[in-house]
Amino acid sequence: MATARREGTTKPVIEEFVAALRAAGTPENCVNPYAGYQPGIDAHRRCDRVRADQLVSYLNRRRDSARLILIAEAPGYQGARFTGVPMTCERTLLGWKTGVPSDLVLSGGHPGQRTSSPRMARNRPEQERGITEPTSTIVWKELVAQGMADRTVLWNVFPFHPVRPGNPLSNRTPTPAEVQGARGLLEMFLGAFPGCAVACVGKTALTHLAPDMPGATALRHPANGGAGAFRRGFAALVRGL
């Protein structure tokens, strides 16, 4: 399975990249997980800073070890919206019976923190342990199984959480205009990991990356019955690195 490779000579500092994320303008009906506070949704007023710090810790841990970048569509309310880390839910971050050791996610000595408010929980497990996401569990279990937890960086083609109007706990596909408007942030991220192979998780990311990265290929997204195909595709991808 072929993958595109990004070459480069300079690496922007991770902290500078996350600062750019925090300062970026956010399109209408989108949430920037790294800037701002939503009462009743976020647990406290510093949640955006917590998520930004967790992203810095996650990226810095892989700054020199990464060999592969997996790019999905956008943060979801069950994942990066509340962790700051793409394709990573709160229970994976905190190690709540997902089969993934929590100390594999962030840099050593940086404990993960929950940022979703228990008041917005839809059931007792969410109230007590945070939000879970099947995609997060599947992806991280495969990263561990293939020995790629520290050799893979997860990201999204669009860095903000697109929501349906009036429903902060919803997901939608980002529009082409939204993705294009955040293109500079994607390029900045890719520049931080030169030489890495790049593959897409799902067709949306591939659609947006294909014009500039014709060698990129797409893995089946784990959602909606795609777990088996994702596992097989990821295993083949790793063998080809």
Image: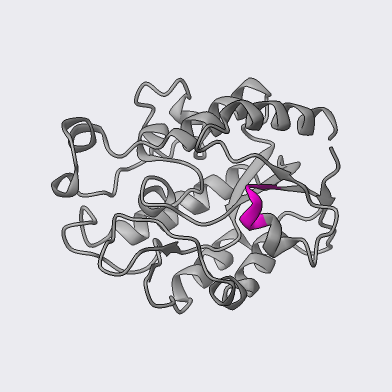
Q: Is residue 46 left or right of residue 199?
A: left
Which span of residues is magenta-colored? Answer: 200-205
- 233 relative to 186, above or below: above
Residue at 52%, 29% (x, y): give it.
138
Count of labels shown? 0
Question: In which quadrant is the N terminus drawn?
Answer: top right
Q: x%, y% of residue 84?
A: 43, 52
Residue at 29%, 55% (x, y): give it.
169
Q: x%, y% of residue 122?
A: 19, 41
- 20 relative to 138, above or below: below
Q: Does residue 192 show up?
A: no
Question: In which quadrant is the C terminus drawn?
Answer: top right
Q: Does residue 65 show up?
A: yes
Q: Is residue 31 left or right of residue 197?
A: left
Location of residue 219 by image quarter = top right
Q: x%, y% of residue 179?
A: 58, 70
- 15 relative to 240, above or below: below
> Is 64 or 177 nearer to us in this picture?
177
Q: x%, y% of residue 98?
A: 41, 24
